[in-house]
Image (cartoon, helix red, strand yellow):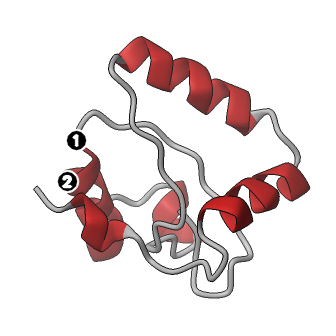
Amino acid sequence: MTNKNHTVIYVGFSGQVYERIHQHKKKYSKGFANKYNLNKLVYYEKFESPNEAIKREKQIKKWNREWKINLINDFNPNWDDLSHFLQP
């Protein structure tokens, strides 16, 4: 997730993606995502198991910003909000 100006990139994992995105957009929690107004889903991956997802999350979190930007650009060149693709 990112903010409107794409100044911060947040990498996270959730077993309930739609609900988690909704929480970010409505600012239900007072954590990192709320602090930086992260309410735009620009990249996502789906996994069969939570362990696979957690492994990938940890991998991407170690990347530098440029690598994350390249990953997003390859998947979503316009950095559109993709949250509407993850409806319940």
Q: Residue at x 33, y 58 (%)?
A: 29
Q: Position of residue 22 (x, y in %)?
A: 24, 65
Quadrant assignment, res 18? bottom left
Q: Which residue is mark 1?
A: 16
> Residue at the bottom extreme?
5
Residue contact between numbered discs 1 and 2, judged by CB atoms under 8 Å:
yes
88 relative position to 22: left or right: left
Question: Alpha-carbon distance for marks 1 and 2?
Answer: 6 Å
Quadrant assignment, res 7? bottom right
Task: Please name the amino acid that badge 2 sits on.
Answer: Glu
Q: Sort mark 1 into few (<14), some (14-19) or many (20+) by Cα contacts within 10 Å.
A: few
Q: Secondary structure at mark 2?
A: helix
Q: Residue at x 85, y 55 (%)?
A: 65
Q: Position of residue 30 (x, y in %)?
A: 41, 60
Task: Please name the amino acid that badge 1 sits on.
Answer: Gln
> Residue at the top extreme?
51
Image quarter of the C terminus: bottom left
Q: Which residue is mark 2?
A: 19
